[in-house]
């Protein structure tokens, strides 16, 4: 268990929003607070929920989250908005809900800032990004031996490519730093796509490659968040559909897109998670046990 948590913490440090949520949930579980998050326009939008208002006392929650995130020091996440509301039924589009009606949806919200990592920490994070791409977007409740064994050959096959690309990554670090200074938004980097509300492409509304990639990442984050609380067959079926939509968007990215290789890698990961969710749907009953 400690090895698993160490791995999650490392991914959280790399800026993986899903891993950040898992660390927060682990440390806030003792006070009955559950979190969800999405990265939008350079801001980590964090939702804190609990069954009783007393569990969401503003000063206590803000201080604890500030301390946890400062200890993680997630890459490229420097601004955080903490949103608070009473626990509600699972909503995949919770951010749109609170953004549309903040006065009726929230108890309170507060903005905080995190410390920026040092230059050596940024370099280490770039190196770790290569390793991160060999891992799947984990659905919390699926840890069977069979699925782990199936992932091992895939990971071993990518380790060789990871070592070769590491040398080129170090050489290009200077160029990467220069490009980062030229961007208007320092928090937006190739390794952490900014998630913005975009429609799924249709024949009448064709999206760009960048929009397809961004929408796919956002759907993947929603699927992981939904998997943390899913209990019924219907819920897991919906999660499988979400993973499928995310995979289709990644597969639709053209080869001219600068992040084409990453898109193909994640498409494969999303397809695997789709199959896992389908297996969960087959194992669950039609109705929630609650």
Image (tube, helix red, strand yellow):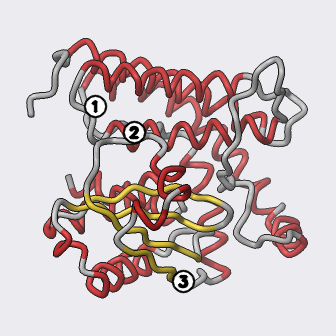
Q: Residue at x 43, y 22 (%)?
A: 240
Counting residues from the start of the chain, the first of labels 3 and 1 encountered is: 3
According to the picture, the residue beneath numbered tag 1 turns out to be: 142
Which residue is painted at 22% across and 62% down in the image?
Answer: 50
Determine which quarter of the picture holds residue 259: top right
Give the distance between the C-alpha atoms of the residues marked 1 and 2, in whole angstroms.
8 Å
**10 Å crowding of disc 1: few (<14), some (14-19), many (20+):** some
Image position, residue 192 (x, y; %):
65, 56
Q: Residues within 10 Å of mark 3 (few under 14, many from 20)?
A: some
Q: Residue at x 50, y 32 (%)?
A: 156
Q: Which mark is residue 138?
A: 2
Give the foreground label among 3 and 1: 3
Left or right, 233 with respect to 19, comes to: left
Query: Circle 3 sits in a helix, a strand or a loop, which is it?
Result: strand
Kindly check if marks 1 and 2 are in contact, taking CB atoms under 8 A apart as contact.
Answer: yes
Vertical arrangement, residue 187 with respect to residue 282, above or below: below
Name the residue carrying label 3: 113
The reply, left or right, for residue 131 in relation to residue 60 is right
Q: Which mark is residue 56?
A: none
Placement of 166 over or under 52, stated as above or below: above
Q: Nearer the viewer, residue 87 or 36?
A: 87
Q: How far is disc 3 from disc 1 in space, using C-alphas?
A: 34 Å
Instruction: From the viewer's side, name the closer residue of 199 and 43.
Output: 199
In the structure shown, which secondary structural element does the residue marked by tag 1 occupy?
Answer: loop
Q: Position of residue 106 (x, y in %)?
A: 39, 66
């Amino acid at each position: 268990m400690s090895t698993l948590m160490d791995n999650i913490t490392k991914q959280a440090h790399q800026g993986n929003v899903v891993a950040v949520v898992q660390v927060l949930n682990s440390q806030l579980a003792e006070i009955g607070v559950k979190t969800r998050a999405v990265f939008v326009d350079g801001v980590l939008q964090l939702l804190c929920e609990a069954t009783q208002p007393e569990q969401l006392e503003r000063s206590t929650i803000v201080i604890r989250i500030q301390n946890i995130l400062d200890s993680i020091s997630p890459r490229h996440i420097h601004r955080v908005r903490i949103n608070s509301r009473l626990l509600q039924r699972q909503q995949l589009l919770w951010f749109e809900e609170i953004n549309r009606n903040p006065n009726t949806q929230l108890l309170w919200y507060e903005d905080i800032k995190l410390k920026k990592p040092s230059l050596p920490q940024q370099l280490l994070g770039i190196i770790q990004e290569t390793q991160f791409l060999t891992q799947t977007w984990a659905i919390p409740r699926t840890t069977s031996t069979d699925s782990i064994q199936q992932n091992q050959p895939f990971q071993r096959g990518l380790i060789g490519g990871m070592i070769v690309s590491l040398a080129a990554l170090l050489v290009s670090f200077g160029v990467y730093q220069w490009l980062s200074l030229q961007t208007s938004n320092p928090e937006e980097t190739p390794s952490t796509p900014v998630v913005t509300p975009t429609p799924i492409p249709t024949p009448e509304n064709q999206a760009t490659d960048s929009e397809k990639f961004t929408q796919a990442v956002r759907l993947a984050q929603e699927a992981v968040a939904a998997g943390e609380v899913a209990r019924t067959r219907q819920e897991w079926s919906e999660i499988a559909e979400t993973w499928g939509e995310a995979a289709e968007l990644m597969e639709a990215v053209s080869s001219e897109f600068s992040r084409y290789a990453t898109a193909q890698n994640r498409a494969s990961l999303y397809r695997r998670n789709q199959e896992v969710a389908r297996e969960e749907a087959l194992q669950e009953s039609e109705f929630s046990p609650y």
